[in-house]
Image (cartoon, rainbow, N blue to C red):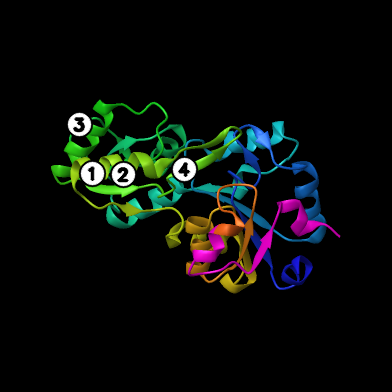
């Protein structure tokens, strides 16, 4: 079945957390995985909701795990957030960020001014140094009329010792405190996958979205019109499929299983 689906696609969109690694631990032989993709002639984009690191840092992390991947093949929800902000503020804006370096880098690279005073927009992502004060400041700006943009709705992400709170947990706190609904940039919303499909240069139905979460990776692929593959090395498991209203085209134990002879 895996080979059958590979024959039907022109490129892959790979999630990272829970697919390629958990924390700093690789899942499988990443060097072999990317060599195999190259030998099959299947281009790929790494598209993650995790905006804590920029593409260069993620590429460096993968090198330490034995995989050489160009930073130009890596996109995150921070970059999708920057693109959404461009649509709302084509001439730039002052932006307050509740998040880490990857999100900040994406917004600064896109030409936005980061500020702690009177922002036109508030962008919220995962912040592992979150405090009560930070939540209060972001919520106050939103109540004063700032546009509320969120990186992604992932409530958790996989780590070697289990699931840890994700960006969605932080966003939920700001949402409750501000009584406002955010606009989301990452999966399952279309921005991140649409960017990846354009980078691959193929039709959506000829792209395979591979991820470990039904609610973001797989639903995002469905929403974008891609074929989808659920990998059972992260958050979602087979039992979750029993109550899921949409189903992946393929279920695999590991990413290596997709590529083996």
Q: Secondary structure at mark 3?
A: loop
Answer yes or no: do the residues labelled 1 and 2 have beta carbons within 8 Å? yes
Q: Earlier in the sequence, mark 3 or mark 4?
A: 3
Q: Looking at this rendering, what residue extends furthest in the left direction?
A: 144
Given residues 255 and 232, the one toward you in this image is 232
| Quarter occupied by the N terminus | bottom right
Given residues 105 and 156, the one toward you in this image is 156
Please give the label number shown on residue 156. 4
Residue corresponding to mark 2? 172
Q: Which of pointers 3 and 1 indicates the residue nearer the eye? A: 1
Q: Earlier in the sequence, mark 2 or mark 4?
A: 4
The span shown in magenta is 240-261
Task: Name the residue located 66 percent from the left edge and 56 percent from the top edge.
Answer: 44
Q: Earlier in the sequence, mark 1 or mark 4?
A: 4
The location of residue 252, given as percent across then percent down, is 70, 58
The CA distance from mark 2 to mark 3 is 22 Å
Residue corresponding to mark 3? 117
Answer yes or no: do the residues labelled 3 and 1 have beta carbons within 8 Å? no
Residue corresponding to mark 1? 176
The CA distance from mark 2 to mark 4 is 12 Å
Task: Name the residue located 41 percent from the left edge and 37 percent from the top edge.
Answer: 126
The location of residue 96, given as percent across then percent down, is 28, 36
Q: Is residue 19 left or right of residue 38?
A: left
Q: Earlier in the sequence, mark 3 or mark 1?
A: 3
């Amino acid at each position: 079945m895996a080979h059958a689906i590979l024959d039907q696609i022109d490129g892959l969109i790979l999630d990272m957390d829970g697919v390629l690694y958990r924390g700093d631990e690789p899942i499988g032989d990443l060097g072999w995985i990317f060599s195999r993709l190259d030998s099959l002639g299947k281009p790929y984009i790494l598209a993650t909701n995790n905006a804590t690191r920029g593409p260069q840092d993620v590429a460096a992390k993968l090198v330490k795990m034995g995989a050489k991947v160009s930073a130009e093949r890596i996109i995150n929800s921070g970059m999708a957030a920057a693109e959404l902000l461009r649509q709302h503020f084509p001439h730039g804006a002052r932006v307050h960020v509740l998040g880490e370096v990857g999100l900040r880098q994406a917004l600064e690279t896109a030409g936005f001014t980061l500020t702690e005073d009177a922002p036109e927009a508030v962008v919220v992502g995962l912040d592992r140094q979150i405090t009560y004060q930070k939540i209060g400041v972001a919520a106050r700006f939103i109540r004063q009329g700032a546009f509320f943009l969120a990186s992604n709705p992932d409530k958790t992400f996989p780590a070697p010792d289990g699931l840890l709170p994700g960006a969605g947990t932080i966003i939920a706190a700001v949402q409750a405190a501000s009584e406002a609904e955010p606009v989301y940039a990452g999966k399952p919303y279309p921005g991140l996958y649409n960017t990846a499909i354009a980078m691959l240069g193929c039709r959506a139905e000829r792209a395979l979205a591979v991820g470990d979460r039904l609610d973001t990776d797989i639903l995002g692929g469905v929403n974008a019109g891609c074929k989808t593959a659920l990998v059972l090395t992260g958050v979602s498991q087979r039992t979750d499929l029993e109550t899921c209203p949409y189903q992946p085209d393929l279920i695999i134990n590991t990413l290596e299983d997709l590529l083996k002879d």
